[in-house]
Image (cartoon, grey):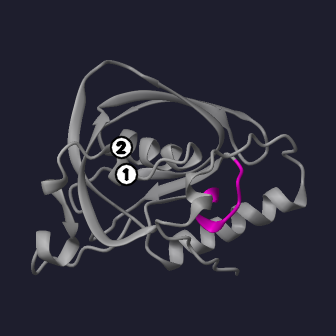
Amino acid sequence: MAIREVLKMGDPRLLTPALPVADFASPELAQLIVDMHDTMRALNGAGLAAPQIGVGLQVVIFEVAANPRYPDAESVPFTVLINPVLTPLSDELEEGWEGCLSVPGMRGLVPRHTGLRYQGFDASGQPIDRSVSAFHARVVQHEVDHLHGILYPLRIRDLRNFGFTETLFPGQNLQDD
């Protein structure tokens, strides 16, 4: 089990676009995915992108099961998504509160597409093609943004809706995503 350090907002590596994965059979890719999974689970995250642990490759993982931090969110199956392409299913946007392991202790109200199609590859290079909505769509968009050097505060429309979690949601046991 390898829990990796998560880079924090301000680290220039988080602003650098990630490169596509070319070799799906490499032991380095397999180890990266294991490390990402271990890190995400250890920190109770909903997702993690390779750039967040200092690896500039287009790899994201996400999963939401029964999680007290997301009591109203539908389950999202564990997914490894490599070289993703997102296609919004409509122009409809919805604002929702987001946090991030790279922006610890803070939350912001972020507009996201309510539905999207995501395509890419799994850990063995097999194609993935899913259409999703609601929280699942939000999680995918958040993680894929990391591959383009975008952290969620850059998407906030009104910075009055950005602040420390314990101030915005007193008494709630929310952690970073």
Q: In which quarter of the image is residue 50?
A: bottom right
- Residue at (71%, 67%) from the top-left corner? 34
Asked if the residues shown at circle 1 and circle 2 are in contact, with their CB atoms under 8 angstroms apart, the answer is no
Residue 107 sits above or below residue 76 on the image: below
- Residue at (56%, 52%) from the top-left corner? 15
Distance of label 1 from label 2 (alpha carbons): 11 Å
> Which tag, 1 or 2, sits closer to the chain's start?
2
Q: In this view, does 163 lie to the left or right of 121?
A: left
Residue 54 position, x and y percent, is 67, 65
Q: Quadrant of residue 165?
A: bottom left
The N terminus sits in image quarter: bottom right
- Assign a secondary structure to mark 2: helix
- Residue at (40%, 61%) from the top-left corner? 65
From which residue to which does the magenta span run? Answer: 49-57
Q: Does the magenta stretch include residue 39?
A: no
Kind of residue sitting beneath label 1: Tyr
Kind of residue sitting beneath label 2: Arg
Residue 172 position, x and y percent, is 15, 76
* Residue assigned mark 1: 152
Q: Around disc 1, counting alpha carbons within 10 Å, would you say few (fewer than 14), some (14 to 19), or many (20 or more)? A: many
Q: Which mark is residue 138?
A: 2
- Residue at (27%, 71%) from the top-left corner? 68
Is residue 70 something one can see in this rendering? no
Q: In this view, does 42 lie to the left or right of 72?
A: right
Residue 10 sits above or below residue 4 on the image: above
Is residue 89 something one can see in this rendering? yes
